[in-house]
Amino acid sequence: DVKVTQSSRYLVKRTGEKVFLECVQDMDHENMFWYRQDPGLGLRLIYFSYDVKMKEKGDIPEGYSVSREKKERFSLILESASTNQTSMYLCASSPPGAKNIQYFGAGTRLSVL
Amino acid sequence: AQSVTQLGSHVSVSEGALVLLRCNYSSSVPPYLFWYVQYPNQGLQLLLKYTTGATLVKGINGFEAEFKKSETSFHLTKPSAHMSDAAEYFCAVSDRYKLSFGAGTTVTVRA
């Protein structure tokens, strides 16, 4: 079974803090993704990566950055957390190709106070 | 750009009744379509997908969906709802790299 592991289920941070959300997958997938999930808005893509050290902006990249130094790990960084970044963050991975299933982690619920 | 619209943010059904969740898509190329389910406090898991071939697709837990190109629809159905079907359901369309998700439909099942 594919496993996508997000390092924290719940996080509480202060406004202005630098926040790291970590994601690791164990299936040697090329593609990795970060989404945020908000009620009534579904999942919105923040960034994705199709190879090590490669990254592409998704639909809502503002206020976020990412890092992919190793194939199995994809980090989401909030340089200076703000209250409007309070959300559920979901990581996913997939093999290459549009037909392929994305596998999701359990999510990190981030609260910025 | 590709997108999906899910009609109805909440659906309430009685146990044993038909579940019908509606999804319409917009795509400039032949679409790859997916339904995902999210149980409380969990990530998303795949219910079923349509890529090519047979337009009626069967998935896990008794769900199925039919791709109708003429109607640009990919509605999800289950003939008989079970209490364990209470969850949020997302329709998604794929382009070369990424998925675009609908806003989601929350299903509640009444005993």
Image (cartoon, helix red, strand yellow):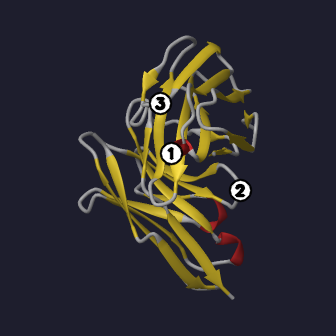
Report, in whole angstroms, how far the alpha carbon at label 2 lies from the one at label 1. Answer: 21 Å
In the rendered image, which quarter contains the C terminus of chain A?
top right
- The vertical placement of A53 against A29, above or below, is above
- The vertical placement of A21 against B70, above or below, is above
Pick the residue in front: A76 or A27. A76
Disc 1 is attached to a residue of which chain?
Answer: A
Figure disc tally: 3
Q: Are marks 2 and 1 on the same chain?
A: no
The residue depicted at 63 percent of the width and 80 percent of the height is B109
Q: Are marks 2 and 3 on the same chain?
A: no
Contact (Cβ within 8 Å) of mark 3 with mark 1: no
Contact (Cβ within 8 Å) of mark 2 with mark 3: no
Quickly name the residue at label 1: A84
Q: Secondary structure at mark 3?
A: loop
Q: Secondary structure at mark 2?
A: loop
The residue depicted at 51 percent of the width and 59 percent of the height is A39
Three-letter amino acid code of the residue under disc 1: Asn
Pick the residue in front: B86 or B82. B86
Quickly name the residue at label 3: A63
